[in-house]
Each structure stands twice: as C-alpha cells, then as structure tokens.
C-alpha cells in the first residue's frame, strides 16, 4: 500500500512533465540534450545563489515564527539570477526558434523537481502512514512547471527586438512578480494565514493569470510576425 501511494505521487509529479515534453514538439526536434544542458545550468545557478546568500545574507535575529520582510526581500532579489540563467540558456544553449524557451523551461523545471521533490517523496511517501502533504507536493510540482514555462516565455519576450515598447513595462512587471513570488507566498502565509491547499490554489491562480497575460503577448507577436512575413 505504501509503495502504491509512492507510485501515485511520482506519477502525479513526473508524468505531466513527460506529457508536456512530448506534446510541445520538443520530442520531435530531439531537444532532450538541450533540456539536459538547461538542467545543468539550473544546478550551476542554484550553486551561485547559495554562495551569494551564505556570503552576503547571513541568518537574521528575527524571532522564530516572525517574518523579516526586509531580509526576505533582499534574499528574493537573488532569485533574479534565475532570469539571467534562463536568458543564458536560451541564447547560448537552447538553439534557435520559438521552442527554445520550452527547452529551457523544461530542463529548468525538471532539475528543480528532481532536486527538491524526489528525495522527500522517496523518503516520506513510502512511509507507513498515508499523508496528504505528498499529494500536495505533487500538485505543487505541476504548478511549478507552468510557472517556469511562463517565466521562460517572459524572458524570451523581453529579449525580442520586435517587442512593442508599450508592452515592455508589462513584461518587466510580470518578471518581477515571478521572481518575488516566494516573498509574496511568505507574506500570505504570515499575514493571511493561508492553509496548505488554499496556498496551492493561490499559487495556481497567480501562475494562471501570469501565464494568460504572457500567452496573449506571445500570440500577438506570433500573429504580427506572420502578417509581416506575408
């Protein structure tokens, strides 16, 4: 029974990644190696972030259970390094074409999934007692996949020279929101007292809104490019 629970959690976490990889066209272009290189870039970026956090942002003296907004804000600024890493992947590794942000985001999200979710699922989901938190963790990994795809799309849109000037502030605002999402989550936890499932719903709604706006801009640019071509 415990192994069945572990299998369900793994399927909920990893199968959507496989489906997105196969249905997005990445499999047809043999982009597996590009995704693997993006995953390696993710690991290097996280190592750099850990070094910066350990060097310039030591542990504060805030009492346990309290939220240090200023400290968390400064630490969240380090997450801007992820945007730089995604930009590097899309310009130096992922190749050409509009699918390169999919290759970058798939490799990035998969590496994060393996590094942050596999061990807790392996140790906890195979426990004696059933716990909903591992199902919650599996659903959260799906939200993270969409979040990384949206972030990579926004980075790709910002790097485009044909992006309309009026849309640049919108893209930059969305990039800032995606980068500071952990801080927003912490504020919601401490200020509003959201539960686990409610917090997951809030993350999903936040990602959905960001993704719809980014997708609208992306489709608009695609139509504009097609019209200029013809």
Image: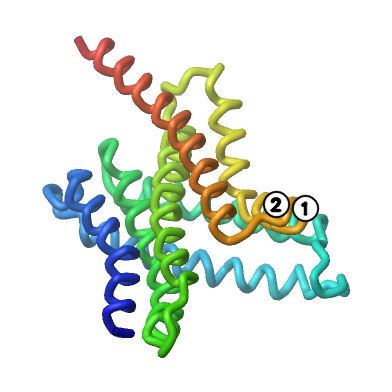
Indicate whether 87 appears above or below 54.
Answer: above
Q: Indicate left or right for 118 with 210 as reference.
A: left
Give the residue drawn at x 43%, y 45%: 152
- Find numbered disc 2 in the image and state the secondary structure of the residue it sits on: helix
Residue hosting label 1: 191
**Badge 2: how crowded within 10 Å, few (<14), some, or many (20+)?**
some
Q: Is residue 19 above or below residue 7?
A: above
Residue 78 tag number: none
Residue visible at 25% across and 50% down in the picture: 20
Which label number is shown at residue 188? 2
Residue 87 in percent (x, y) is at 45, 47
Residue at image x 45%, y 69%? Answer: 43
Image coords of residue 206 (percent x, y): 54, 42
Specify few, some or many for label 1: CA neighbours under 10 Å numbering under 14, 14-19, or 20 or more.
few
In space, the residues marked 2 and 1 are separated at their CA atoms by 5 Å
In the visual, does 221 lie left or right of 21?
Answer: right
Name the residue at 29% across, 84% down: 1
Query: Residue lying farthest bottom?
Result: 128
């Amino acid at each position: 029974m415990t192994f069945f629970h572990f299998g369900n959690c793994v399927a909920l976490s990893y199968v959507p990644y496989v489906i997105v990889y196969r249905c997005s066209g990445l499999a047809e272009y043999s982009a597996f190696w590009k995704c693997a290189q993006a995953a390696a870039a993710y690991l290097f970026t996280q190592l750099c972030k850990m070094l910066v956090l350990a060097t310039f942002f030591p542990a504060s003296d805030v009492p346990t259970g309290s939220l240090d907004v200023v400290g968390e804000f400064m630490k969240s600024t380090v997450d801007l390094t992820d945007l730089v890493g995604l930009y590097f992947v899309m310009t130096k590794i992922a190749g050409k074409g509009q699918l390169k942000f999919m290759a970058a985001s798939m490799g990035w999200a998969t590496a994060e999934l393996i590094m942050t979710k596999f061990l807790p699922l392996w140790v906890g989901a195979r426990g004696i007692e059933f716990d909903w938190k591992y199902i919650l963790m599996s659903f959260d990994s799906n939200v993270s996949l969409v979040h990384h795809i949206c972030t990579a799309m926004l980075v790709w849109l910002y790097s485009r020279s044909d992006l309309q000037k009026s849309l640049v502030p919108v893209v930059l605002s969305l990039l800032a929101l995606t980068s500071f999402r952990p801080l927003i989550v912490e504020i919601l936890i401490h200020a509003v007292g959201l539960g686990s499932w409610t917090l997951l719903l809030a993350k999903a709604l936040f990602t959905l809104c960001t993704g719809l706006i980014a997708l609208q801009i992306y489709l608009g640019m695609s139509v504009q490019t097609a019209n200029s071509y013809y």
